[in-house]
Image (spheres, grey):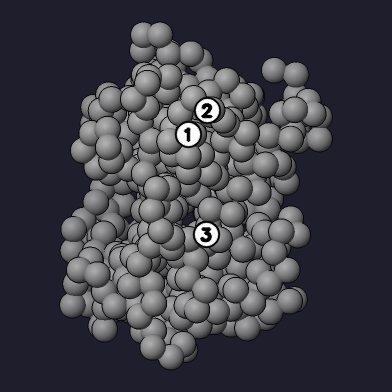
Amino acid sequence: MPTNTYEALPSQVKAFFDRQYKDSYALFEASRHPKTGLYADGYMTLGENPDFRSSIAATGVGLISLAVADKEGWDEHAAKKALITLKAVSGEIDGCRVARDEKSGFFAHFVDMETGENLDSEFSTIDTTLLVTGALFAGKHFAEKEPKIMEMAEELLSSIDWNIVVADKDNGVIHMISKNGEGIAPLPAYNEYVMVSYLALLGRPDDEDIKALWLNNFAEDKINKLPQEDFRGLAVLNDHPGAFLSSFVHQFPYYLVPEYAESKTYLEYYKNACLADRMKWTELEDVPSYIWGYGAGPNDGLFGGYHADRINDAPHNIASSYIIGGYLPVYPAGIYDLYAQYSLHIPYDVYTNPEDKEDEEKFKAAYKYGLHRLSWWHLEQPDRWYPTKVTLIDWSSMLYGLAAFKHGMSFFSTNLPRVSSVLR
């Protein structure tokens, strides 16, 4: 490809990039509750927004989206909005008390976005991690405009009993759920729970079990000892022999753990995960090279419901465009794959169908904020599949990747604390 830098993109590709980048933030804004600053689990493409169900993980990404909007000059009230969100999760907004495990402080996965009431969900260690990571990111970015955000983020970090996440400090096993102050549902490494270990160390640097969990398994010198699976000669990190992971699992630690963003070892595994994803798609019949991306997301109206697609486990082979976005730092040519999807199939901002106005309205609604989930075999069918929901946590890969493509990975690594800052 002719370039790997934003400034040198051809004019038409750059125009697409700018539109998709700004729309990546706009989707978060459309999913935010104006009073509480909590973010919906997903944007309902063919329904009303914001949805009543808030995701704590999406709320963490929403805080990062506000930092992006501030950096780009898209929202002059971004700092104020971030502060409102922190007040909501800290219990400082009347009528809103976000559900937490009373003993450990971990947040419920899904809550009512106005009252904070638990919507019959678990107290999740990874979703709480994503929330607090977003708070720390916003705190650092808005340090001058609104220093209160960092103060509240640090209070949030210290209010949680991180010790309960440690299931097996020698083998990197982390509890997924907090129940009555105890950790349950252990999950073996490698997976996105690397972020839980990272944040636990920031929150409790003097806890020997937490320290051992990181140093024994996830520190830079231990990355190449994590479980791996071979795909066509590529070593890809995984958690179970014979299986692969959805690509978002590789992407989240890359953006949200500074040591991983800067690790040459992790970079090689990240490149391998990207190439394995792309290579597997080339084995499918009649699929062009610009259609790929094994990500998680909803499939309502096509089959089943939400699914985390991965190599050898991707029902109907639905491609997630945001996965391409997430890999842009190591595969910058992916911006041309996204542009091909847009220009040839999903021109979401200019699409018209004079002969079928219903199709035009549904298509423009389904892709109002750009590329996300798509079925190659349904793109051109008369009875087209219209994705009915965009889950914000999965959409985050698009926002992260486009921001990194334009500004470099330092935008992420400099806005989050390093493990070394608490291990001295």
Residue 305 appearing in the image: yes
Residue in front for this viewpoint, 115 or 142: 115
Amino acid type, mark 3: Ala
| Image coordinates for residue 332, horizontal then vertical, percent | 64, 29
Name the image quarter holding residue 190. Answer: top left
Quadrant in which the C terminus is drawn: bottom right
| In this rendering, position of residue 398 left or right of residue 402 | left
Residue in front for this viewpoint, 97 or 270: 97
Amino acid type, mark 2: Asn
What distance separates the C-alpha of mark 3 from that of mark 2?
26 Å
Element type at mark 3: helix
Circle 3 residue? 30
Q: Are marks 2 and 1 in contact (CB under 8 Å)?
A: yes
Query: Mark 3 or mark 2, which has the lower sequence index?
Result: 3
| Image coordinates for residue 89, horizontal then vertical, percent | 43, 78
Element type at mark 1: helix
- How many residues crowd mark 2 within 10 Å: few (<14), some (14–19), many (20+)? few
Circle 1 residue? 357
